[in-house]
Image (spheres, coloured by chain):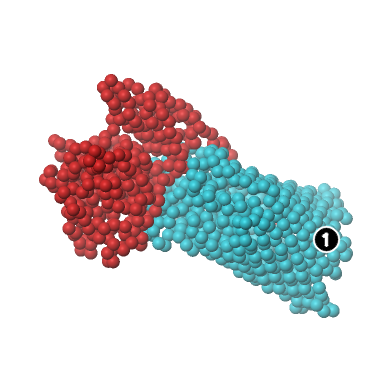
Amino acid sequence: MHKNISLYLLTLLSVGYANQLLAQQQTVNNIFQWEVDRQFGNWRHTGNAAGLLVDQPAHLSALQAGYSSEVGDFKRPQEARRSSQADVSTLGNIYLGDLYIQGHFGYARHDRRNAEYNASMIDPFRGMPYLVADTNASNWVNEHYRLGFELAFPVKDNRMQFGLAMDYRSSSGAKQRDVRALNRFYALHVSPGVVYQIAPQHRIGANLSYRNHKEEATNRSVNNEIDQGYFSLYGLGHSVARLGYENLTTSRQTNYEADRIGAGLQYGFEGAWSVLLSGNYEVGAEDVHIGFMDTRPEGTLLQDDWTLILALRRSRKHWKHIIDAKGYWSNAKGSEYINEFVPGLDSDGYSNRYSSVRSTYDRSSIGASYELIKMDGKQYSYRAKGKLAYGKAEDRYLIPTSTFAFEEMLYGASFEKAFSLGRTARSLVSVGVSMDYRQSLNADYYYGGSLPNSLPVTDLMVRETNYFASDFLTIGVPIVYSFELSSARESSLFIKTNGFYQRADQAFFDRRKGLSVSLGATF
Amino acid sequence: MKLEKYIVGSLFVSLLAFCAIFQGCQKINDAREIEDMQYASLNIEAIPVIEEVTSTEGLRLVLQNYPEGIRIERTMQAGVNYIDNIVPGVYSITISGTVESEQGNFFLNGSVNNVMILRDNEILQIEVDGATVGPFAFSEIFYSGTDPFYFRDQFYEITNNSDETTYADGLYFARIMPIAATTSMPIWPEEDGNRYLYTDRVWRVPGNGTQYSLQPGESFIIAQFAANHRLPQYSPNSPIDCSKCEFEFNMNNPNFPDQPASDMQHIFFNGNAAMGSSPQYLTSVFGSALVIFRVPEGETYDPVGNRDLQTRDLSTTSPTLYAKIPRSYVVDAVEAVQNEAMGTAKRIPTVLDAGITYVDATYNALGVRRKKVGNRNDGSPILMDTNNSTDDFERKVVPQFRYHGQGIPDWSPAN
């Protein structure tokens, strides 16, 4: 049996093929059904795989390949001015007897052009303040792999169900201009969970999670005759300017290693309305070290995250209602180290003499959305959505005191209408429009350090602040076309495009626009 | 039965996960134990070495945290001085200035480097002694080279900053190890104490003792390669023509042959008087720690013949031999590093040079130049020499010989 599971799982993950062994559940026929179906699972968004079967997931296999591109001056400094991505992904699910499995695999190649102030991280926006930054606008070529699965085990005693979710991500990145960077990243996530039915309509669930990730960044210069200056960033513009690499070697390694653990609790009610209340707590620490030999501790980021979600769903033959509310609070502390190098053959190299929390990063957001879906058979006829969110950030460098803070409101509305291109509904097209407006309530940066004329202060942080001080409007136009290949095999092709145009109400920036196209199949 | 199998498998995976979680918890706990940064404070006292000086009141106290650009300046009171609100970090501390006593005025100088001031009420005592100044001083140094990748236009200008006629004959020149500033410092023999500096190569100005005289305010230049570097075959972008320099470090490289300038005498390399196979004498384009020194009358200095003046770097297994330079011989020292952040990697003792200088890049055709503080009656310049390169030198200047109007010695080919 284990062999069979492995075999089916591998098959599922590699080509997204799910066979027809058992079809006791509904089947997704096309992307329009898929988009409704994936919105309607409450438990699938909790991270507790044990609750997947409560959602009664429809049978689905999907394979898609896409290309997206965006360009514009309205961006954060570390964001690429122009970027493009080619990707392929697949997902599917299957019932093997009483065992339910769903899996996914994805690959993406991401080309980023003219990104600044980052020479050590594939994703400079993942909240890590300790990084290497140069001032040369550079191209990055990144590749990302992702695969994972979620298992829901058979119900025990008609009440209890166990589940397991695993996710693995691997990325590589290369910065194309001195100071060069060659990065390797992996992340592993494991989350076992349990759901217990306390009454016919009431369930409670709990899950644990463990995440581990590591990123290695190696900096070197192709032109080793001219040494490019660069900065070690420590948050809020505090930096140390550097020239040449560590200890006169020809390269510099920055190693990021993180562990995160967490737990979630859920309560679900299934009635006229499907209700799910979910709370998650996660804490993690990420250490940053310089070098493989004579390793020098650079910093540690300790981060606590709380998430609270309320999801309400009501499903009728012609109408569906979706209400989501979410609150998120995060508190991170950045610790820095003062080290002493102890030379000698018997020495361990750097010895930590002092460590202290030197910066803090607080984030919070709260938001809600409502979506109304008019159904036409198994797919939507039209759907309309409105959303509202408030976000806040307060960052502080303790000594010397520097602060960065912003508050924002996000407003959004979207509408999509599906049309049948023929009497048999074999061809469907959906055209929509979305409008999102970000209103900056406040954005302020104060630097109290001793290097007010350094570029991380006068350029990086000033532009970052300008970005968050900008109100901007994003208009999107999603278009989806689906063509049924075989009604017997319940398979169809789809083409999905989405264009957006972003305009900022500030003199600092111009605009940003982008287009994505993907071709895929559901079967 | 199936369910049990699944659960056993799941538990196995979970067990592995929890082993990793345990490890992860340790990392999280370690991070949780770190406390918020608090300001540090320092109780510092200057201890005069000269018997005639009884009070250090009025001396200037400077604390510098180079990487973070922090500089704290105070005028010292008598006895212990308390300084609070110090950002914890690694500091270079200098005490200098003139004190009056019944025996006259004394210019005192004392400093320590890489002092960790981390907590409340740290205690530090610094000895202050009569500062050794001159007569010679590095007045301009060009070490960074010229784009693209041209480093043969390095030069070192040395000025007679005293009020007396002085002879360059027998003046030694060396760069202090490591060649470029790094926090991975060598280990030298413990029994040497603080008596020596260490170099890989020693040079000496030739002459019979009275051959190369310099009047007050006159200077001479030692070039790495005393050619006109602006010629097409060298580096037209070079800021300097070294063809009229007084001396050069000739390494007998046929591709860069001996020039009309007088050759510096090679004294020591790896335990021998022979030069070895290096094609040039290149001081780091990042910036080297340079000294000029003179052997006091009645003493001899023979690092080749006297094995006591040789040592290995004990932090490695390398057999390379380095020459010891007694600190008391040093006439002038300048610490050039990559940039301000490398102030924590000083090689020269702070009593000789309490500061650093830098040009922030390599091959940028910029150098460092000692500041002028005044002129003698004859108009010759008097240069600043407080044994602190941070204060004494202008940084990132376009190289130019005798910028402050230094005189040209009558024996110079520049006449």
Q: Is residue A252 visible?
A: yes
- Image position of A337 (left or right of A19): left
- Chain letter for cyan, please: A
Q: Residue at x 75, y 76 (%)?
A: A483
Give the percent coordinates (x, y) of residue A462: 57, 50
- Image position of A358 (left or right of B259): right
Residue position marked by numbered label 1 in the rendering: A372
- Image position of A53 (left or right of A208): right
Along the line of sight, the residue nearer the viewer: A238 or B279: A238
Tell me what hue chain B is rendered in. red
Along the line of sight, the residue nearer the viewer: A36 or B344: B344
Residue A71, image quadrant: bottom right
Along the line of sight, the residue nearer the viewer: B365 or B85: B365
Q: Residue at x 24, y 36 (%)?
A: B328
Quadrant in which the N terminus of chain A is drawn: bottom right
Give the percent coordinates (x, y) of residue B130: 28, 30
Give the percent coordinates (x, y) of residue A347: 39, 43
Residue B350, image quadrant: top left
Q: Residue at x 36, y 40 (%)?
A: B391
Residue A348, image quadrant: top left
Going by the numbered disc 1, the residue's amino acid type is: Leu
Regarding mark 1 in the picture, which secondary structure is present there?
strand
For residue A127, above or below residue A396 = below
Give the percent coordinates (x, y) of residue A499: 69, 68
Q: Residue at x 38, y 24 (%)?
A: B57
